Amino acid sequence: MKILFKSIQHLSYLGCLLVSLSLTFSLSAQNTTEHWRPAVHFSPKKNWTNDPNGLIYFKGYYHVFFQHNPKGNEWGNMSWGHARSKDLLHWEELPIAIPHGEEFIFSGCVVWDKNHVSGLGEPNKDLLVAIYTADYPNKKQEQHLAYSNDEGLTWKKYGHNPILDIQLLNFRDPNIIWHEASKQYVMSVAKPLERSVQFYGSKNLLAWDLLSEFSNQGELEMIWECPSLVELPIEGRENESKWVLFNSSQGVQKGFVGMQYFVGEFNGKTFINENSSDTKLFVDFGKDFYAAIPFYNTQEKEVLWLAWALSWQYAKEQPTFPWKGQMSSVRKLSLVDSQEGLRLKQVFQPDFSQWEPTFQAKDISISKPKILNGMKMLQGKSYVIDVEVEETNADRWGFRWQSVDNPQEYTLVAFDENKKQWFIDRSHSGKVLSPGFFKLDSAPWVEGRPRQMRVWVDHSMIELLAQDGTVAISSLRFPVSSKENLSIFSEKGKLDLKQITIWEVK
Ligand code: FRU
């Protein structure tokens, strides 16, 4: 008996050893890539994410729900993940919020049902309502509702779903605002293949009436998804605002994959584009800014948003493990006047201008590349650099991240004075994920705005907001070498800087 027991013990020990050996083997078969993980931008601890969903500020926390595969590092089993932050820099990942069933839980929004107009949940507790697309693969997409009485931690799927169904295979991504003037909730939702956004109105979040449809304008080459409608203040014009309609476009790349916007009026029923129907306005000229939606219920009613910082073109090939997909910075939105009309302005949040700089220099002149030695201590950290030009006669100027051990590996974030273009060049940044990844990301100069750029570097993420936030380029890069120098350069001419300021983002 004793012998039998011993040998069973022995066998189970051997079994454990084998299991743990095979686990170690499968983990090391795919090495973790934590050095590419952003420090202060949100990414799930493990597994896949795409669009941000249900962004809401509630009781001291910014909540981010997100398209998530709880079981794997590729798209599938779409459910809502959940994270929250008090300061938009430290993120706490919480348990899966809305798991998939027979239906996939696609993108959507969360609103605070302050007056319990839906009549759902417990009347004495705060009520959050999530409205999202239920996707029945290859069959149908319809809009569903779930509600939470515990600040978004757990959700009950509504018993009478769908709340909106127009019998379409593609009909998705509801985003809801409270429209004070017409005293109703207004939902924007996309009919992607038709390049159209429908608006619906509701008093109780359950019954929705079609208000109007906006289509056939702007960029039409690719399908439309993830619409949102917001009212934005116009900077420098007191108490003036305009309505802005956003959507994300996706498809086989001819131009590029990204987000566009329309500026105009919304009267509680119809959105009227104030530009000609063929005007194309783009949010971000990088390839890694997609499906952004605004936060609901912000403190000062300011419009804040964030995006999925990746592109459908090469998302599958993002070489990160055990997660894939990450969020952009949070940005505050407004409109500003330009010679071509009103343009979107985006400012990183928190607003670093209010922070004590880690480094600052004023009135410097550069004629040959200058390595910023002080940057060595920021190696592998997250930081923001702001630079403003007094005057220049250079052909190109900007920043160069140069690998110390491989002369062929570098990244440029710069301005081309001849082409009048801002650009991020990641064609020699390390891993090139696909032919589309290789292309230079460039954005046109905006007349009348300062020659200034602010760059946020957070491991694999580079976000450029130039000309006081009216130019945006967001691009990922995956350096192979672990040590790099940062220099400021000026080609074929002199660069006089008003200031250069660096903030470490902890
Ligand atoms: C946009 C999108 C949405 C959809 C979700 C599915 O990136 O295609 O239209 O709801 O992703 O994950």
Image (cartoon, rainbow, N blue to C red):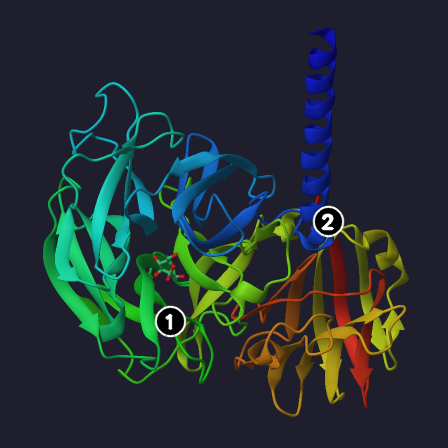
Name the image quarter holding residue 150.
Answer: top left
Q: Determine if the C-beta at disc 1 is less than 8 A from ligand 1.
A: no
Residue shown at 90%/61% (left/top)?
373
User: Mark 2 belongs to which amino acid?
Assistant: Ser
Taking the image as shown, residue 307 lies to the left or right of residue 198, namely right
Quick check: 213 above or below 174?
below
Is residue 453 or residue 10 the one in the foreground? 10
Taking the image as shown, residue 425 lies to the left or right of residue 372, namely left
Residue shown at 67%/85% (left/top)?
416
Residue shown at 39%/55% (left/top)?
293
Name the image quarter holding residue 348.
Answer: bottom right
Q: Secondary structure at mark 1?
A: strand
Q: Quadrant of the C terminus?
A: top right
Q: Residue furthest top?
A: 1
Quick check: 81 above or below 149?
below
Taking the image as shown, residue 314 lies to the left or right of residue 337, namely right
| Residue 50 spot, x, y in % from top left | 46, 56
- Report if the CB atoms under discs 1 and 2 are less than 8 Å apart: no
Quick check: 170 above or below 422?
above
User: Mark 1 belongs to which amino acid?
Assistant: Ser
Q: Is residue 195 something one can see in this rendering?
A: no
Q: Which mark is residue 249?
A: 1
Q: Determine crowd level at label 2: few under 14, some 14-19, many 20+ residues with C-alpha closer than 10 A.
A: few
Quick check: 92 above or below 418?
above
Q: Secondary structure at mark 2?
A: helix
**Mark 1 / mark 2, whichever is N-terminal:** 2
| Mark 1 vs mark 2, CA separation in Å | 37 Å
| Residue 419 spot, x, y in % from top left | 62, 91
Q: Nearer the viewer, mark 1 or mark 2?
A: 2
Ligand 1, image quadrant it occupies: bottom left
Residue at mark 2: 28
Is residue 60 or residue 241 the one in the foreground? 60
